[in-house]
């Protein structure tokens, strides 16, 4: 197993991706979140954006999964869709480059993205929505398979993690990262039990707006129940 993956094995990866345009959406704050996560025991980080990645790389040498979110007019793919995105992420310090590996129209074939990642000396992470995505990505040379996009492609987004996808991906030879709606410590433990090699948590740690909304919503539901009785 690659040394980077050995560092991540059975550990928590924290996704430091603030709400876009929110009060935490500044590289120095993202870097502070990253250091705080490492102080709490995180073994790796998932960082979006070149300036954010550059700021985080300057304060830590733990493995970083880098990605860029790009809104395209001719494709639904958003996560690292272009070869130039891959090259830029590697140049500012990404150890692993994550990209959308779903079977949807895209500007660049997944094969080319994987080749570009490896040419830059990084590992390739396939953000998957299904087991078929994982099988195709592994066949193309992706070292890391993530359940990242489950529930975000078609239909309503589930409330909790997709453990069935994690189980399916864990039957493949790649390094499996459970990601997507891991909002409580018990969720992370369930991810490991389902066969994940590592787990990503994001909003529950680095998006206080979302966490506040969860509390507010739960309290509003309780008030509604009291009025009904």
Image (tube, rainbow, N blue to C red):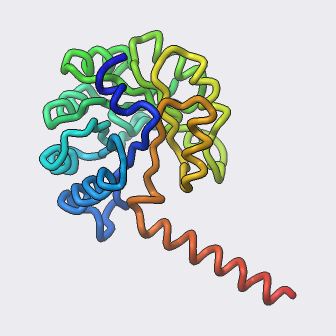
Whole-percent x, y for residue 18 in the image:
34, 59
Q: Is residue 69 visible?
A: no
43 lies above or below 219: above
Number of numbered markers: 0
Q: Position of residue 159 (x, y in %)?
A: 65, 53
Q: Residue at x 26, y 17 (%)?
A: 118
Image quadrant where one finds the C terminus: bottom right
User: Which residue is located at x 71 percent, y 85 percent?
Assistant: 223
Residue displayed at 30% across by 30% down = 97
* Observer-nearest of 167 and 75: 167
Give residue 4's quadrant in the image. Answer: top left
In percent of the image, x 25 and y 23: which residue is there? 122
**Nearer to the camera, 109 or 66:** 66
The x and y percentages for residue 14 are 38, 48
Horizontally, residue 50 falls left or right of residue 66, namely left
Q: Is residue 124 visible?
A: yes
In the foreground, 79 or 30: 30
User: What x and y, as percent, mark residue 185?
Assistant: 55, 53
Quadrant where the N terminus is found in the figure: top left
Q: Among all residues in the image, which is located at the extreme right?
A: 229
């Amino acid at each position: 197993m690659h040394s980077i993956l050995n560092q991540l094995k059975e550990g928590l990866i924290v996704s430091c991706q603030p709400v876009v345009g929110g009060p935490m959406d500044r590289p120095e704050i993202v870097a502070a979140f990253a250091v705080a996560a490492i102080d709490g025991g995180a073994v790796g980080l998932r960082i979006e954006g070149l300036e954010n990645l550059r700021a985080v790389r300057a304060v830590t040498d733990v493995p970083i999964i880098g990605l860029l979110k790009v809104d395209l007019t001719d494709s639904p793919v958003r996560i690292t869709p272009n070869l130039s995105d891959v090259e830029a992420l590697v140049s500012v310090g990404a150890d692993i480059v994550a990209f959308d590996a779903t079977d949807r129209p895209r500007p660049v074939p997944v094969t080319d993205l994987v080749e570009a990642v490896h040419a830059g000396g990084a590992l390739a992470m396939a953000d998957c929505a299904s087991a078929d995505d994982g099988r195709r990505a592994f066949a193309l040379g992706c070292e890391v398979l993530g359940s990242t996009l489950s529930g975000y492609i078609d239909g309503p987004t589930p409330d909790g993690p997709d453990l069935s996808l994690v189980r399916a991906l864990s039957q493949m030879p790649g390094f499996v990262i459970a990601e997507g709606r891991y909002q409580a410590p018990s969720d992370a433990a369930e991810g490991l039990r389902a066969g994940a090699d590592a787990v990503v948590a994001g909003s529950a740690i680095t998006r206080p707006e979302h966490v506040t909304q969860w509390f507010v919503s739960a309290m509003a539901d309780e008030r509604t129940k009291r009025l009904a009785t």
